[in-house]
Amino acid sequence: MSALAPPPRHIHITEVGLRDGLQNEPVVLSTEQKLSLARALVDAGVHEFEVSSFVSPRAVPALADAAEVVEALRGVAGLHLSALVPNLRGAERALEAGVDSVVLFVSASERHNAKNVNRSVAASLEGFEQVARLLDGSNVALRGAIATAFGCPFTGNVPVESVTEIARRFADLGATHLSLGDTTGMATPPLVTERVTRLREAAPNLPLTLHFHNTRGIGLANVMQGLALGVDRYESSIGGLGGCPFAPGASGNIATEDLAYLLEEMGLETGLDLEGLIAAAGRASELMGRRLPAQVSQAGPRLALSDCSAVPTAQG
Amino acid sequence: MSALAPPPRHIHITEVGLRDGLQNEPVVLSTEQKLSLARALVDAGVHEFEVSSFVSPRAVPALADAAEVVEALRGVAGLHLSALVPNLRGAERALEAGVDSVVLFVSASERHNAKNVNRSVAASLEGFEQVARLLDGSNVALRGAIATAFGCPFTGNVPVESVTEIARRFADLGATHLSLGDTTGMATPPLVTERVTRLREAAPNLPLTLHFHNTRGIGLANVMQGLALGVDRYESSIGGLGGCPFAPGASGNIATEDLAYLLEEMGLETGLDLEGLIAAAGRASELMGRRLPAQVSQAGPRLALSDCSAVPTAQG
């Protein structure tokens, strides 16, 4: 029934709300509050979590309990837990806590990487070799993530070659997956096509995950483009948790429930339960003390019918 | 560069904020305030306006000044002004005020039509014949609009046949355009494909306009599907003005600036100026006394760069 290329049947959604969602929120949750949100997500069928970042607790106090969160969620069967890691020290802490995979992250923009982790892209990549050696022989997977993969908030457009070059390095390091981060919502459908096409040439054995932000309202339009290209892995945040520290009012990650709603309506399987996600989004909203940007959790599912008598007339 | 079918080059956007946007807002604007918003939109390149509804002022007090708004905007050269009209009385008022086209509206759902205009779909359509006779020989165009074309908030799914049957009637009445209204945000990409395909069979000479609401966050995903099908006419509301009276917090129409941003980034021409739209959205927000749901006007254009020193570190 679709005019688009036939999209993949099953879509993998990784929930990043506990990491990307919480790192920018003004409210800092306790470990127990984070776990209550994680449990609500598990009840909704979520089993892939990017749970936290093993970065400096001084730089990101909201994620200082990364180890505790991983250890507690280890007790839940069937989950895949990943965590962001900038360097060897972070990887050691993540391994000790018991993650299933470490996600090494670097920006495609020199300026953003310097700002983010205080080193050059080359220095980040060099440090990753130490991490690869640490993981060698362990059963912990190495994943790669490229921040500002569609544009840099400080310097603007990012050449696709900066992205493909890092992807090749991740492939050489033995990465099993690669995530393209649209850190501040600069992705557009033509950029999605360009980057996905070029990455498939540069690193043909590295499955791609698309991580979009809805900062400029077109996050799910970019997902449509990804689907048309056959990309079957996406990252999202429950309720659209998160934001952008230098664009007040701008929303952050695409919302898990809006993404799951779109995909299920398109006949694609996500393994997620929409009512459960709406309940989890309610919990997230309660914990943050504010209404979150996601839409489906406010309007309800498509066939949640209204009481006719409550509605004004002559709306056209 | 796109994996989708080549989309149309030029996209027509009709601004419906003054009508669909304002009819549900708790704040009622004065005629002068509406005109100041319209002038900001004209400055941004908007020249197609659905300016108001000629419905009962008791039912929709916010649009009671429909005639005054049309008469004032008649003074601006180069605009196409349309207005919603439910029946002969409304059409007479619209003609007298000086519209370029009347948009006759009826719901594809009996229940919604009864609630909206207090008559059956058949009675609405019969009344339209009187309007067609009124317009015959005038230079005012007759357009058709089908509300709840993708689903009804009271009764759920709406059979595609209910939509195609009304479209045929509009074609017989000599309509020049047909708009499909996603009144409460129930459209999905597969429904867009189904309805557009079937309508092209049922009324091949009637150009289609898609009117999406972002109630469930997928308004622009539906636009992507429309583009893939070659649909080149969309309706939107500046700032995402409007909402849904029975889903508090749910957003209304897709936002003109987010739509224009998406289209321009895809290399499609809209004739609209993004900075101008952002200024108009600022004016709309000021008038309504609240932040509006559109994203681009909060985050700024894609290459509006940030001051590096203002940003926290280690975001991943």
Image (tube, coloured by chain):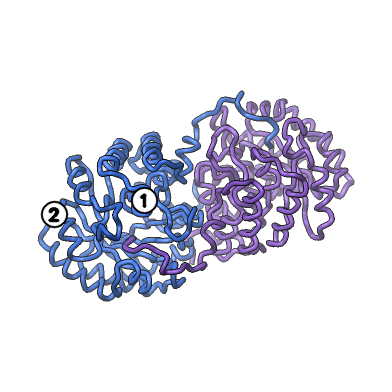
Chain colours: A blue, B purple
Mark identifier at residue B228: none
Which secondary structure lies at badge 1?
A: helix
Residue B188 drawn above or below residue A118: above
Identified at 54% across, 34% down, the residue is B247
Asked if labels 2 and 1 share a chain, the reply is yes
Q: Seen in the image, is B300 located left or right of residue B271?
A: left
CB under 8 Å between discs 2 and 1: no
Q: From this viewpoint, is residue A218 visible? A: yes
Residue A202 percent coordinates (x, y): 32, 71
Q: Is residue A256 above or below residue A128?
A: above
Disc 1 designates what residue?
Answer: A21
At mark 2, the secondary structure is helix
Instruction: Look at 86% across and 38% down and name the residue there.
Output: B92
- Residue at far right of view: B137
Residue ID for mark 2:
A96
Q: Is residue A269 above or below residue A124?
A: above
Quarter assignment of residue B156: top right
- Chain assignment, label 1: A
Q: The numbered mark 2 sits on a residue in which chain? A: A
Q: Is residue A254 left or right of residue B199?
A: left
- Left or right: residue A290 versus residue B160 is left
Instruction: Give how far across and how far down residue B102 sits, in percent.
Output: 78, 44
In the rendered view of the protein, which quadrant contains the C terminus of chain B? bottom left
- When asked about the image quadrant of residue A177, the answer is bottom left
- Which residue: 18% across, 65% down? A88
Where residue B19 appears, as percent x and y from the top left, is 70, 44
| Residue B297 horizontal side relative to residue A120, left or right | right
Mark 2 or 1 closer to N-term?
1
Q: Quadrant of residue B103?
A: top right
How much space separates mark 2 and mark 1, taking CA atoms? 24 Å
> Residue visible at 31% across and 48% down?
A18
